[in-house]
Amino acid sequence: MNAKTVAIIGAGPVGLAAAAHVLERGMSPVVLEAGPEAGHAIRQWQHVQLFSPWEYNVDKAAARMLAPTGWNSPDPQSYPTGGELLDRYLMPLATRTPLREAIRTSSRVSAISRVGFDKAKTRGREQAPFEIRYQNGKGPEVLRADAVIDTSGTWFSPNPAGRNGLPAIGEPECAGRVAYGMPDVRGAARSRYAGKIVAVLGAGHSAVGTLIDLVHLADQVPGTQPVWLLRGADPAKAFGGGRNDKLAARGELGAAFAALVASGKIRVEAEFGVTHLSGSEGRLKIAAGSCSGARSVIADELIVSTGFRPDFSFLSELRLRLDPAIEAPVALAPLIDPNEHSCGTVRPHGARELAHDEPGFYLAGMKSYGRAPTFLMMTGYEQVRSIAADLAGDKVAAARVELVLPETGVCTRGGVETGAAAGCCGGPPKEELSACCAADETAKKAGTAGCGCS
């Protein structure tokens, strides 16, 4: 595979980084973005401040491409909002660099296959180019490419409220009182939530941030009542690593949230697995069933912040190798499986872990993590750097690790959560695929079974 056309799905941070690396490697990127402009998904949460500073949010190849344009690099230690990420980085990258010629907006991919090959046909498959079909408002279009990097993300595929992965019974019928993700409760959506009883379902950063914003809204508008619906039994698991978190803003977010919960400003309903939604005298009845009997909460609005899942519908004719539980590439899934082992983030990985049985096709960015919640933007940048090197035939660079990830200060090993006082056993491993941490890697190199934490 020599001079190639590489189709990149999605013009978010990782998609544009992929295009920059592909162009730097002498290949031709074509970026297909479903939204009307680059960074469309980020516009849905542009009010949110990132918990990683600028130094972790700017891709190196993108920065090199921006440099000749007179771009002013932001203070590496300051924390951008989603809107600032757009205005100060993504939009200049999309409009003031050679990438502007590669981006096709309002171009929603509907299907991908190989030219002349369905999923079942094998002989000669690797030599056939990819056929990408997309809609751009003018009718169906077709693009042929030598490789495809899918960075389309998961933002527009939120998980439903139901505790079993399905929509709660009545959820579609109550759609007018249900929002997903992280709505701007203090800004654009203020009128919807001010003075209301607002239930927030979830235990991740989106739920935590929304609940904190609702407390601030309650200080300004009497009658605003935040209710935290928690599927698990222990609220403390949502508080994070505190001072042990190397991303200080992430640790501070958890600490601030813990203080609000302790003060009673947030009503907590633990072990609340939503099963039914229904109307109740002009409000919303949120019911949870359990072996000990049903419970319910009456609210005006429900915000479902239970994470996201990938959309594979347009990839049905490609040969994907996905973990059946996490829905991530099979080599990556054991490293990010939240049921088994997590140090807050996963060690850097690239083309090798992201490859499928369809040569030249890769998932990258948030979508590559499937249903796992621990993705960081800098991980995506490392992914596409490695993928571009692999597509260019530079196997040494593709295998090289060029990123050190920060720890959260909390680890889960075999389902047991512990403090990471030693930096999660010395941090992530550098080379050994089967190792779960640096200490485990060292032990295995010494000929022992490992450090015992995996």
Image (cartoon, rainbow, N blue to C red):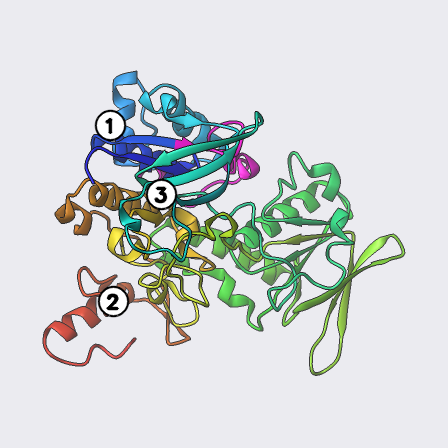
Residue assigned mark 1: 64
Quadrant of the rendered image containing residue 450: bottom left
Q: Residue at x 40, y 39 (%)?
A: 131
State the mark number for residue 144: none
Regarding residue 137, the answer to whether it shows in the image is yes
Residue assigned mark 3: 149
Marks 1/3: CA–CA distance: 21 Å
CB under 8 Å between callouts 1 and 3?
no
Q: Nearer the viewer, residue 340 or 75?
A: 340
Tell us which disc is closer to us: 3 or 2: 3
Q: Secondary structure at mark 1?
A: helix
347 versus 291 height, above or below: above
Report x, y in % for residue 400.
16, 50
Q: Residue flagged by tag 2: what amino acid is it?
A: Cys
Q: Nearer the viewer, residue 437 or 399?
A: 399
Residue 400 is a magenta residue: no
Q: Nearer the viewer, residue 386 or 210?
A: 386
Quadrant of the rendered image containing residue 23: top left
CB under 8 Å between callouts 1 and 2?
no
Q: Residue flagged by tag 3: what amino acid is it?
A: Ile
136 versus 173 height, above or below: above
Instruction: Say whether disc 3 or disc 2 marks the residue closer to the N-terminus.
Output: 3
